[in-house]
Image: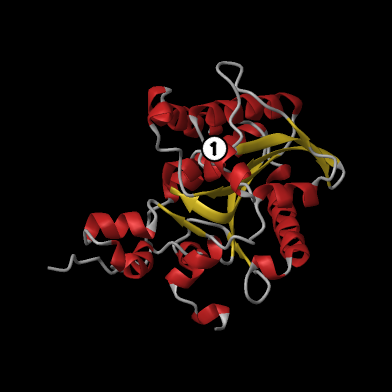
């Protein structure tokens, strides 16, 4: 089916495709000399977030990537890309390091959401995400975020406060997974496809709503069909948007970032989006 005619649920399935490139695949393409940095300097490291420095287009860059893991053991070790509080604290620590040394930041998003287990709750996952969101507004270097797979809820937003937010064509970004939304609204996950439409979670929808800045085209069939082409397109898009903000002075970077997120939710044409009505 041509990409322009795909349903929201079909895009959800592509965003979750097991062969889809993950954040670390893209990072190693962008910066083959990438050196991973670990630890939050408080309680430990979170393997769900890959972070470190590498040389990208001739300059040292700080990279973040939510990493799901490919094999089952790796997926389990990385909590399927769902970050713990240690991950958000690690991100804040390294973002401030990047600002200190004037390294630009690239953040790749691919997570169903933050880790929902009791250990994360006990360690303060909600406050860790809140602090991360707040701190991103104080990072005085250019930050480009790109959603490359799933962008789920606060788990994604905690890593996506940026000067520009991009999305791969078949990625998704929403307040909740379609299954969760269907269970809440209809009390039945069988309505997941309908929920996906109502959530307006696709890249074209979010570009139209001015929540993201660009949709990055994928090869026919999805990013997994041609990783090299997908990586080149992501590389070019990130570079183009970074160049657009690279010459801004630090106060202007922070003010524009703040204004960008205050703008989210404003519908200039005042159209009414369709509302989900629970089935009786």
Seen in the picture, residue 152 relative to 2 is either above or below; the reply is above
The residue under label 1 is: 255
Seen in the picture, residue 92 relative to 55 is either above or below; the reply is above
Residue 37 image-quadrant placement: top right
Q: Position of residue 181 (x, y in %)?
A: 31, 56
58 vs 68, left or right, is right
Q: Position of residue 187 (x, y in %)?
A: 21, 58
Q: Residue furthest bottom?
A: 1
Q: What residue is at 23 percent from the left and 58 percent from the top?
A: 185
The colour scheme used to paint the residues is secondary structure
In depth, the one of 180 and 127 nearer the eye is 180
Q: What residue is at 24 percent from the left and 62 percent from the top?
A: 188
166 vs 277, left or right, is right
Q: Residue furthest right?
A: 58
Seen in the picture, residue 198 relative to 136 is either above or below; the reply is below
Regarding residue 67, the answer to whether it shows in the image is no
Q: What residue is at 64 percent from the left and 62 percent from the top?
A: 19
**Looking at the rendering, in which quadrant would you find the N terminus?**
bottom right
SS at circle 1: helix
Q: Position of residue 48 (x, y in %)?
A: 58, 38
């Amino acid at each position: 089916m041509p990409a322009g005619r795909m349903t929201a649920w079909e895009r959800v399935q592509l965003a979750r495709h097991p062969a889809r490139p993950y954040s670390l695949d893209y990072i190693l393409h962008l910066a083959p000399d990438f050196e991973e940095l670990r630890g939050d300097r408080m309680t430990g490291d979170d393997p769900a977030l890959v972070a470190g420095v590498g040389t990208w287009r001739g300059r040292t860059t700080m990279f973040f990537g939510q990493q799901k893991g490919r094999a089952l053991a790796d997926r389990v070790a990385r909590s399927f890309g769902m970050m713990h509080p240690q991950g958000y604290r690690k991100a804040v620590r390294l973002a401030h390091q990047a600002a200190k040394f004037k390294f630009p930041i690239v953040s790749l998003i691919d997570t169903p959401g933050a880790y929902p287990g009791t250990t994360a709750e006990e360690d303060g996952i909600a406050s860790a995400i809140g602090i991360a969101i707040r701190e991103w507004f104080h990072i005085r270097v250019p930050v480009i975020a790109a959603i490359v797979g799933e962008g789920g809820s606060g788990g994604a937003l905690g890593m996506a406060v940026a000067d520009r937010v991009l999305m791969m064509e078949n990625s998704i970004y929403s307040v909740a997974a379609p299954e969760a939304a269907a269970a809440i609204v209809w009390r039945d996950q069988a309505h997941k496809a309908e929920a996906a439409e109502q959530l307006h979670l696709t890249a074209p929808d979010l570009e139209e709503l001015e929540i993201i800045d660009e949709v990055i085209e994928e090869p026919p069939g999805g990013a997994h069909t041609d990783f090299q082409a997908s990586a080149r397109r992501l590389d070019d898009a990130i570079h183009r948007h970074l160049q657009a903000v690279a010459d801004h002075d630090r106060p202007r970077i922070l003010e524009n970032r703040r204004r960008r997120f205050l703008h989210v939710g404003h519908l200039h044409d005042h159209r009414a989006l369709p509302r989900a009505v629970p089935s009786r």
